[in-house]
Image: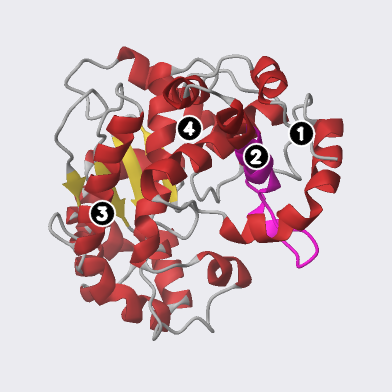
Amino acid sequence: MRLTLTTTSSRYRTLVATSLALATTACSDSTSPSTDVAFVVEDIARFWEAVDAGGSADAFQTHYLARASSALQLFAVSRQITGTSLNQMVRAYPRYFAAIRPNTLALGPSSPVVTSISANFATMRQLYPRSEAPRVTFVIGRFSTGGTVTSDGIVIGTEFYSSDAATPLNELAQFQRVNVKPSSALPAIIAHEHTHVLQLRHGSLQARARTLLERSLLEGSADFIGELASGTHINGHIHAWATPREAAVWQEFQAAMNGTDISRWLYNQQNSTPDRPGDLGYYVGYRIAKAYYDRAADKSAAIREIIEVSDAIAFLQQSGYGPR
């Protein structure tokens, strides 16, 4: 969630559907164990074909969605991406999309950022030998999701990861301005999503997570394991705010962690304020996972247990986490 910008209900439905698909697909599925990594970039060129054809709803439907990769097909359904929504987005942010076009088209199997992603997959396999190299599909969505997992692998909303120092941001809404990043952020978001692939395939909690603690642990663990693989994680701004307030954040979290209301903690970046960022559950889950890892004598076993966690309450207790 990976940067996760979807609604709570749609994110959960996607994860459940993904877990079932991964459990039932054959070994030829793109998330099955493999030493090869497939990077799919063709959808990006088709998006710009639609723009060049006029950028109308019909143009996006004909040139982009009707010719979509299998991952984009799944993504479009789960994120309600239509020709109309894409037309509205490009019309709302014309200068932004004109500026990021060359950066999106620069993505390819031999580009430096993709080389880094491939190296991170190799690192993940060293950390967790059961690791698989999933297919990664780069698409352009409707500014709803930066990254997610489907039965076809990892899908990246490249519109979030294509800015540079010259990209105009003034026409973007606050939500978009806060979350757009350069392509150099892609290795971290993909390492996060890769961890979700492993949680789905080898763990049992992802498919049945309900409580705030369970779901925060899954997201925070993806940040933590993703950081081990890539050297960083996707929520530095949340950590910068929360770390000086960790004891207070934990006290508030504890009071809600066994319930199912996650609205103040997860997938709520649209409600961020200077006094409280969204997605604080990612921070708490990360801190629990890190405490578990730091406490373990056998780090390899700890990584396996973090990815394959089945009992969030027992894991929390074993972590010893509890700032005061």
Marks 3/1: CA–CA distance: 37 Å
Is residue 104 left or right of 247 when viewed as pictured?
left
Q: Position of residue 212 (x, y in %)?
A: 71, 31
Counting residues from the N terminus, which is met first, the one under dot 4 or under dot 2? 4
- Amino acid, disc 3: Ser
Q: Which one is closest to the eye, mark 4 or mark 2?
A: 2
Q: Looking at the image, can residue 298 be seen?
A: yes
Q: Which residue is mark 1?
A: 261
Marks 1/2: CA–CA distance: 20 Å
Q: Which residue is mark 4?
A: 14
Q: Quadrant of residue 30?
A: top left
Q: How many marks?
A: 4
- Amino acid, disc 4: Thr
> Which quadrant does the C terminus fall into?
top right
Counting residues from the N terminus, which is met first, the one under dot 3 or under dot 4? 4
Describe the element under mark 2 as helix, strand or loop: helix
Classify 10 Å Cα crowding around label 2: few (below 14), some (14-19), many (20 and above).
Answer: many
The residue at the point 59 percent across, 73 percent down is 173
In the picture, the disc for residue 11 is none
Q: Nearer the viewer, residue 13 or 309?
A: 309
- Amino acid, disc 2: Arg
Classify 10 Å Cα crowding around label 4: few (below 14), some (14-19), many (20 and above).
Answer: some
